[in-house]
Amino acid sequence: MAGIAAMVLTGILGTAMGLNNTGTFMSSCVAFVAVAMWADTQISRRRHKAARETARAAAGETARKAGGEEAGGAARRSGADLSLDADRPKPDGHGG
């Protein structure tokens, strides 16, 4: 929605500045893309931040549970670590 509003505003300003139709349309498209990319970045940052906070909370909860149990010599990992296990490289340097 913000991209369309920027496109309309840029179209009005382009016409007021005396640009021809091609120049007005081109500047409107550039404004639309710029605002759309900015909005996408903001949404991605917000989602990434929320996912990170959720992962930290889950890791803290897992650590609290593991703290009360006997470790048995094995290193305990959170659920977030286990989901990424397939992507980790092997000790010899080759992929998962």
Image (cartoon, helix red, strand yellow):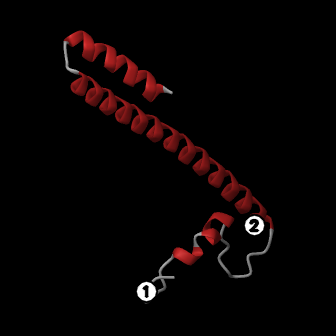
Q: Do the residues bearing badges 1 and 2 touch, measured as CB atoms within 8 Å?
A: no
Of residues 34 and 49, the one drawn nearer to the viewer in this rendering: 34
- What residue sits 41% from the left and 35% below the top? 38
Q: Nearer the viewer, residue 29 or 21?
A: 21
To which residue does mark 1 refer? 94
Disc 1 versus disc 2: distance between alpha carbons?
31 Å
Residue 27: where, in percent of width, then height?
27, 27
- In the image, residue 33 lies at what x, y percent? 36, 36
Residue toward you, 71 or 35: 35
Element at label 2: helix
Residue at image position (60%, 50%) is 51
The residue drawn where x is 32% and y is 26% is 28
64 to the left or right of 31: right
Instruction: For mark 1, give the secondary structure.
Output: loop
Q: Which mark is residue 51?
A: none
Q: Which of 23 and 4 is in front in this view?
A: 23
Farthest-out residue, right: 69
Residue 85, picture quadrant: bottom right
Report which residue position mark 2 lands on. 66
Count of marks, rendered view: 2
